[in-house]
Amino acid sequence: MQLEFIGPFQIIIGVLVRFWPVWLGLAIVLGASFFYRKQLGLYGHLFDSGVGIAGVAICFFWLFTAIFSSTIAPFDPLAQIPVMKDALPGAVAPDGAGVYLFGGDKLSRDVFSRMVFGSQIVLIIAPAATAFALMVGITLGLPAGYYGGRVDTILSFLANLVLAFPVILLFYLLVTPGIMDTPIPYGLAGLFFLFPIIFFATLFYTRYKNRPERLYPLMAITLIVGGWIYAGLVFDADPLGIVHIDPNQLNIFVAVVFASSPGVFRIVRGLVMDIKTRDYVAAAQTRGETPWYIMLWEILPNARGPLIVDACLRIGYTTILLGTLGYFGLGLAPESPDWGTAIKDASRLLRSFIHPALPPTIALMSFVLGLNLLADALREQSMKD
Amino acid sequence: MFAFIIRRLGTMALTMLCLTLVVFFMINLEPNLKKLAISQLDMRSPPEQIESWLVKNGYRQNFFVRYGQWLGVVQKQPNIDPATGKAVQRFSFCNEPAEPYYGGILQGDFGCSTKFKTRVSAKLFPALGATGKLMFWVMVTMVPISLLVGILAGMREGSRTDRSLSVASITTTATPEYVSGVIFTVVFATWLGWLNGSAASATGQGITFYNFTLPVMTMAIYGIGYIARMTRASMVEVMTQQYIRTARLKGLSFGNVVVKHALRNALIAPFTVIMLQFPWLLTGVVIVETMFRYQGFGFTLVEAASNNDIDLLLGCSLVSVFVVLSTQLISDIGYAYLNPRIRVQ
């Protein structure tokens, strides 16, 4: 059967039109941010440089793509239309189903839709895993840097242990399908997901311990929300059934947090060792503040600049890690539309067809590039202050 | 200094011990042992046969006994043939003696690869040699290019050259190997046809420009941006120093100042960064060797991991941990050596 094709110009127009919710969202957000940039602090300063605007725009582009995936993508990411196997870009699907804008892959799925849905997986896992890694790294890095001595020696040894592991070997050991039969991923998840609760509980307790009227509500919120998410993520026992994560994804999540928290730990430790020599820390010590108050309310806010920059870079790095996992076929389901898996599938067939390979590679690269540009602009801005 | 190195070597040995113990634990988990037995027997073997294979080959002994055997502090026992009651070799393809003996890492025996049916050392060291060649060419391309880019960018901070080179290096750090590998293959192998999209022939027929350029390019590109940015930062800092201004005011030409005064001081920081790149290159090696089918260390690691080849995987992790830790040590010592202001107490 002969397929009909549309021309390259129509493909470009078609892609631009499919992305209409993203353009609308971008226009609103960027326009508003640009207009009010004077009042927006550090975020507003990003709009002073071309690099910053480019970074923000690319990041928001993928954020909106992930949010509006189902509107943008013309097809289901798993739907197969047999005629469209390896179809070239712009092939028109039979029966007026639509156009495969970027062609079809070897299982005759729409490359464009898969790329769009792939952004969803990346934009959920990467920032969330980075957030958890930050929590773990901060909660352990603060005492290591502040107390020094034996606490520091032990924690640093553990961090170096993980850092000395080649990432890829770690993933092969932690993300094999067999490991889901053992309690290891759940144990690690149970450990890691405890850190945010500990972090926020200590944060509020140290600040408000003499003001029960503020302390009790905040503690209650922390424990209820934290416990609810904890139950949902670790035991998959959310009473309301909202928080749910696939065992596969939990495994990936844990592996990524495990691999990237020692990096955060090292940065936080270094920053704390630097900041604790400042006068305001000495002043707080003289006032008789508790060590954890000083760490969380005196040191941490002053370490936020480098940490924000690192968080941006780290989300990018986590995206790369997720891609690596997908590329080696670890963890994610083989039919999952994420970019790494798509690159793996397509790179085997590069000699005959190149069109399924390019959209996911360019998508991954542009998203990481956006985050790196953002980090660069943030660093420039924080240097200026 | 001597005491410092001794202490570091001690930490290194402890780290290696802990890490191999962790790896040993992970690959001896029940599902992984099953995977090994199935890969050695047959997909449809009944559970009893799997169990008896595991018992026969000593995989059901106590965990610490087996770790001790691997390490070389506990004797390795031969298999006992149930029919005759005589001791036989554990794995015939490895020429292991048919009597109890100490054969572990401490004796220099890496054990026996169940996947490749040979001794681990016979598989691992040629693979390391092949990866060494790849690494050599990667370093030869990556280091000069990235230093040049970094110095050109950092020479005049904020200039047009600086801005464009900085954006270029950010772009390369956003391009992991599996992305650049695909893009380069598409451009140079599929469209232009200049280069070979596979390095499989490099193992047998030797390295040529045609089959080796793509893997080297792919690996180098990810590191270039990072080293270049570090060099740039270091160069920018050096260029604001008093002695540079003095040299400029003395009437030296700009090129002269950069080459004679700034360069040497600016290259201290990138040295550390380059040494610390080795662990990152290790991941890159795995991706690139899988992508271009080059039979080196990374390829061996993937094969070992996907077949749960216990001894080979332990050997691989030992080697990679050794590489990571020794480069850290060299970078610390080298930094103290290059920078006389820092002396280790």
Image (spheres, rainbow, N blue to C red):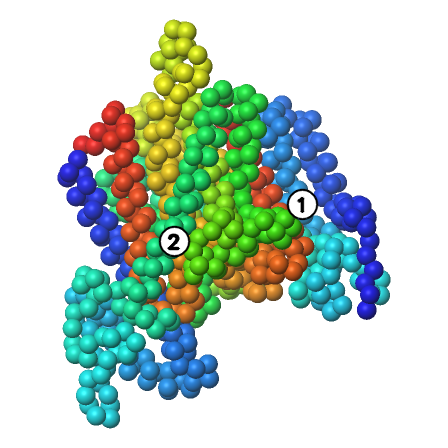
Residue ID at (39%, 78%): B40
Q: Taking A247 as reference, is A75 left or right? A: right
Residue B107 appears in the picture as rendered? yes
Do circles 1 and 2 both sit on a common chain?
A: no
In the image, A41 versus B225, the foreground residue is: B225
Is label 2 in a helix, a strand or a loop? helix
Quarter residue B26 falls in = bottom left
Residue at x 61% of width, y 65% of height: A335
Q: Is residue A24 left or right of residue B135?
A: right
Compared with B151, B180 (above or below) is below
Residue B112's spot in the image, x, y percent? 29, 70
For disc 1, the chain is A
Looking at the image, is A334 positioned above or below residue B219? Answer: below
Asked if B293 appears above or below B52 in the picture, the reply is above
In this rendering, the answer to whether B321 lies above or below B229 is below
* Mark 1 lies on residue: A64
> Residue B201: image x %, image y %?
48, 59
Tell me where residue A31 sits by quadrant. top right
Looking at the image, the residue that sits furthest to the top is B250
Circle 2 residue: B131
Quarter of the image with the C terminus of chain B is top left
Q: Residues within 10 Å of mark 1 (few under 14, many from 20)?
A: many
